[in-house]
């Protein structure tokens, strides 16, 4: 049976996101279980590997993104640990299904936050919504990333290893106050019970429970708060290029998806003629 501990250490050393490391190791372990513990992934010939990947994806009914992640994990594992080059094109998904993200309404976000009595849980979810963060960006936030004098917050080594600076709203600072007073974080903005940064898995459990208590339908993830942030900004008239910058998107096409789920209507857009007073 293959052990993935060495691969996990390598990913951490190479500064892969915590969520990526967790996903890759979990996918490899499930695939190892599928092929059986009597042989390692590297024991399979290319043809055997292709067949097992196809059977595994059919059995699990993996989505487009999960299938891509599985293939990325297998390719990187074989390349880095076994120095084996493998062309996974024959089993690579060709076309991404055109699905729109599920968007939480402002009322649903309010219900989620209002239903949280735990100051830390409320502060975490409010921070994601207030700043449009990914879950890994939240768990990686440190106290010295908060630029208090300038009312800004520094998001470091985000997706693509890029940094960005975001405005820190006063309403969020007010939500942080009771949390700070009770929990007194030392290094990370949000820490686990035994110190160190809060885990993405624990954050997901907090979000799922909050949604259930608020009566929010299933199907949403922590990332839904980021989707809601972007969509609600666009609903309020924020320029799409500014939203792109706030989210840290390289490609405007990624941001433009929020125009398809927004409640804004073309009938609300004023013509420049209206300002001429003719």
Image (cartoon, grey):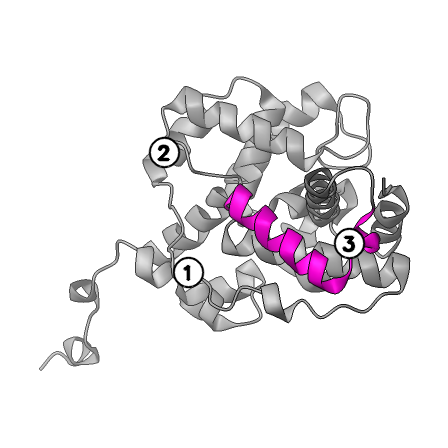
Of the two numbered discs 2 and 3 on the same chain, state the one appearing first in sequence.
Answer: 3
Q: Quadrant of the C terminus?
A: bottom left
Residues at marks 1 and 2 touching, judged by CB atoms closer than 8 Å: no
Q: Which residue is mark 1?
A: 97
Residue drawn where x is 51% and y is 28% of the image:
208
Measure the C-alpha gap from mark 2 to mark 3. 33 Å
Measure the C-alpha gap from mark 3 to mark 1. 27 Å
Q: Residues within 10 Å of mark 3 (few under 14, many from 20)?
A: some
Residue drawn where x is 50% and y is 23% of the image:
209
SS at circle 3: loop
Q: What type of secondary structure mainly makes up the magenta span?
A: helix
Q: Quadrant of the N terminus?
A: top right
Of the two numbered discs 1 and 2 on the same chain, state the one appearing first in sequence.
Answer: 1
Q: Nearer the viewer, residue 127 or 212?
A: 212
Measure the C-alpha gap from mark 1 to mark 2. 27 Å
- Mark yes or no: residue 78 visible: yes
Q: State whether residue 139 is above or below residue 154.
A: above
Q: Residues within 10 Å of mark 1 (few under 14, many from 20)?
A: few
Residue drawn where x is 75% and y is 47% of the image:
21
Q: Position of residue 61 (x, y in %)?
A: 50, 45
SS at circle 1: loop
Q: State whether residue 101 is above or below residue 82.
A: above
Q: Is residue 50 magenta?
A: yes
- Mark yes or no: residue 163 visible: no
Q: State whether residue 126 is above or below residue 194.
A: below
Q: Which residue is mark 2?
A: 108
């Amino acid at each position: 049976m293959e052990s993935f501990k060495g691969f996990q250490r390598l990913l951490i050393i190479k500064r892969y996101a915590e969520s990526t490391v967790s996903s890759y190791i979990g996918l490899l372990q499930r695939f190892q279980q599928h092929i059986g513990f009597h042989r390692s992934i590297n024991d399979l010939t290319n043809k055997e590997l292709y067949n097992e990947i196809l059977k595994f994806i059919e059995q699990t009914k993996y989505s487009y993104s999960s299938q891509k992640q599985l293939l990325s994990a297998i390719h990187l594992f074989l390349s880095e640990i076994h120095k084996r080059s493998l062309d996974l094109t024959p089993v690579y998904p060709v076309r991404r299904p055109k699905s729109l993200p599920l968007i939480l309404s402002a009322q649903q976000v309010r219900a989620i936050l209002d239903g949280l009595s735990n100051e830390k849980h409320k502060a975490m979810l409010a921070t994601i919504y207030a700043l449009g963060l990914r879950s890994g960006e939240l768990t990686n936030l440190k106290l010295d990333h908060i630029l208090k004098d300038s009312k800004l917050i520094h998001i470091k080594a985000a997706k693509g290893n890029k940094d960005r600076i975001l405005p820190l709203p006063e309403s969020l600072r007010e939500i942080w106050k009771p949390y700070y007073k009770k929990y007194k974080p030392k290094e990370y903005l949000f820490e686990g019970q035994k110190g160190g940064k809060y885990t993405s898995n624990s954050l997901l459990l907090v979000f799922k429970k909050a949604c259930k208590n608020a009566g929010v339908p299933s199907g949403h993830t922590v990332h839904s708060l980021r989707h809601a942030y972007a969509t609600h900004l666009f609903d309020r008239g924020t320029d799409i290029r500014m939203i792109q910058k706030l989210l840290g998107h390289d490609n405007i096409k990624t941001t433009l998806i929020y125009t398809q789920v927004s409640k804004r209507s073309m009938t609300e857009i004023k013509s420049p003629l209206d300002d001429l007073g003719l």
